[in-house]
Image (cartoon, grey):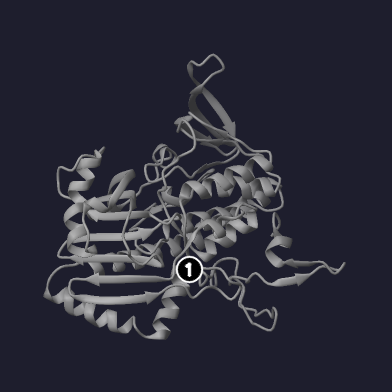
Amino acid sequence: GLTLACSLRNHGVEVRVADCAAGPATSSRALGLQPRGAEVLDRVGALADLADRAVKALTVHIHANGAELTLPIGRGSPDGRQTMFISQADIEAELRRRLMELGGKIEWNTELVGVEQDAAGVVATICDTGPTGVRRKHELHCDWLIGADGAHSAVRELSGIGFPGTTLYDRMLLADVRVDWALDREGTTIWSRGEELFAVIPLPGSDQWRLFASIPEGFPEHASDQDVIAVFDPMLRRYAGTDAAALRSIGWTSVFCMNRRLADTYRNQRVLLGGDAAHIHSPLGGQGMNTGIADAENLAWKLALVVAGAADDGLLDSYEAERRPLAEDVLKTTTVAAVTILAPGVLARLRRGVLFRLMQRPAVQRRMWYSMSQLGVSYRGGPLARTRRLTVGGRRPRPGDRIPDVGCQSPDGRTTRLYVELRGQW
């Protein structure tokens, strides 16, 4: 939602950003910022120094039911971007900063409770806190309403858009901790035995880590530190060669179900969806936040043209036509990754052994990295992509392909970059 707001403000479109939360989130939540996601943040002017603060993700170590695999993921794009681990809270802070620079703001404590629309616009009924501190209900009239309000999207539900799917894994625990150990800080390590899963991911700060584990039935949603330690202690002993004594502190924790769901449609007349409101899936692969960020950029320039009267609103149909198939691919690949790692049994072990051998091949690893980094995302064959080839810098991308960030020189001799010059434009 913040990416969309910044992109629209770059195009001169007036926006109102409403959030039912009391204020900015401080918990880390999503961690993986892929090269394509970083490029979008760069283009909207919100990347700032995130790359300097982040942990570079170089490897994934997988120990799954007797099979082992190490995947190099630090390949990097030709223009130097790499997958990195950094808190979603830090990313949101830079987006809020950029939104304020562009004259926007966030209306906190503002809850959407009703949606009505016709050909002329949308009437959103909201509850917020008035100047006297009293909660009030009133109507907000707007031309378009975009739901970027997460997996439990009020916009989606009030607009009657279905969200079918299934639960992949029933009970999972996330915890951000400070821990004293000697594990590799250059990537993720995942252990799986039977239906038990344990993973560790380095966070910025020499002793900061994200722990990720399956949990038993009955585990409390709002767990105490002792509840968390009781889960992690045997896994730390079994897989990491240490125990709960290594945990110096426990920060944010979250209990969740691993689901895969995809909205029936991304558009209902003047209501549109993006991010987790439109698609959720396994967190393995670090695709969710980046897919939502890319949704926002794709929608923003199209909506800006429609608002300016430079395009018919039929252009907005290309948003779903381009982005929904990519979400379907992400759902498939992250589900395969989850099933490959988690599935128990002899047959699953044999299948895993074959797949892991294939994944050791450099060509397969390159293909996987371009998919995970989202640099390989293309809209070829979509409603806006023709078949005529273009020549850019000696390469021959097709319409719909990503144009890389390249060094440029302005007419006055100034050194610059393509994405800087395109910022706020096409």
Q: Secondary structure at mark 1?
A: loop
How far across and how far down the image is residue 393, in percent? 70, 80
Q: Is residue 338 left or right of residue 184?
A: left
State the residue position of label 1: 373
How far across and how far down the image is residue 291, in percent? 47, 58
Is residue 122 in view?
A: yes
Is residue 261 in view?
A: no
Q: Quadrant of the C terminus?
A: bottom right
Q: Residues within 10 Å of mark 1 (few under 14, many from 20)?
A: many
Q: In the depicted view, which residue is nearer to us: 8 or 381?
A: 8
Q: In the depicted view, which residue is nearer to us: 323 or 28?
A: 28
How far across and how far down the image is residue 277, in percent? 42, 47
Type of amino acid at the residue the image marks with label 1:
Ser
The image quarter containing residue 40 is bottom right
Q: Residue at x 37, y 75 (%)?
A: 71
The image quarter containing residue 165 is bottom left
Q: Residue at x 43, y 70 (%)?
A: 58
Q: Please state the total of marks drawn on the protein image.
A: 1
* Extreme-left residue of the structure: 346
Q: Residue at x 48, y 54 (%)?
A: 292
How far across and how far down the image is residue 425, in percent? 71, 57
Q: Is residue 57 left or right of residue 388?
A: left
Q: In the depicted view, which residue is nearer to us: 229 or 152?
A: 229
* Extreme-right residue of the structure: 412
Q: Is residue 76 left or right of residue 302?
A: left
Q: In the depicted view, which residue is nearer to us: 150 or 103?
A: 103
Residue 144 higher or lower than 304, as above or below = above
Residue 308 higher or lower than 127, as above or below = below
Residue 59 higher or lower than 315, as above or below = below
